[in-house]
Image: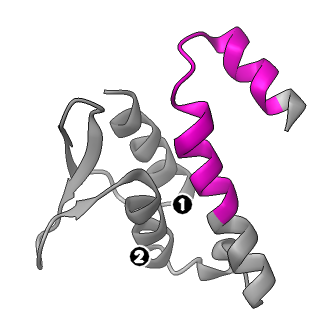
């Protein structure tokens, strides 16, 4: 699953220890994180935000209301626009235009 691989790379980039358990849900293969201390977390943006906070790097999520909104905007864009493209060339073109 591509999202699980991306989330594992995010963990590594944030300096978190590996070991989170990911699965996928539904036809669109929405990522799910099985947490040790509570309910599972569903969705790429939700899990990415959780990992950033777990790593105590909240500054990456923005410090002002506007910065936080921009981070959320890019996460949503990633999910709604980038995920639908199958080839690297299509993704590269899409990101270049944005």
Mark 1 vs mark 2: which is more N-terminal?
Answer: 1
In the rendered image, the residue lying farthest to the right is 97
Residue 53 at x, y = what percent?
47, 78
* Quadrant in which the N terminus appears: top left
Q: How many marks?
A: 2
Work out whether 2 lies above or below 44: above
The circle drawn on residue 60 is none
| Circles 1, 2 touching at the beta carbon (< 8 Å) | yes
Q: Residue at x 47, y 59 (%)?
A: 45
Asked whether 89 or 53 is in front, the reply is: 89
Structural crowding at the residue carrying mark 2, measured as other residues with C-alpha within 10 Å and reported as few (<14), some (14–19) or many (≥20): few
Choose between 6 and 39: the one closer to the eye. Answer: 39
Looking at the image, residue 79 lies above or below residue 47: above
- Left or right placement of residue 98 versus residue 70 in this view: right
**Residue under label 2:** 54
Which SS class for mark 1?
Answer: helix
- Residue wearing tag 1: 14
Q: Is residue 54 above or below residue 42?
A: below
Q: Percent x, y for residue 55?
A: 47, 73
Instruction: Report if residue 85 lies within the magenta region.
Output: yes
Looking at the rendered structure, the secondary structure element under dot 2 is helix
Q: Position of residue 15 (x, y in %)?
A: 50, 60
**Residue at left offset 80%, top offset 19%:** 93
Spatial separation of the CA atoms under disc 1 and disc 2: 9 Å
- Secondary structure mainly formed by the magenta segment: helix
- In magenta, the rendered stretch is 73-95
Q: Name the image quarter holding residue 37.
A: bottom left
Question: Of residues 87 and 14, which is closer to you in this image?
Answer: 87
């Amino acid at each position: 699953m591509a999202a699980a691989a991306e989330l594992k790379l995010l963990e590594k980039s944030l300096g978190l220890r590996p070991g989170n358990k990911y699965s996928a849900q539904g036809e669109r293969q929405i990522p799910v994180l099985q947490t040790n201390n509570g309910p599972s977390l569903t969705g790429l943006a939700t899990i990415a935000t959780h990992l950033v906070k777990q790593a105590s790097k909240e500054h990456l999520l923005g410090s002002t209301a506007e910065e936080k909104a921009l981070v959320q905007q890019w996460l949503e864009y990633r999910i709604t626009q980038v995920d639908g493209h199958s080839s690297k060339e299509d993704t590269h073109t899409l990101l270049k235009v944005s």
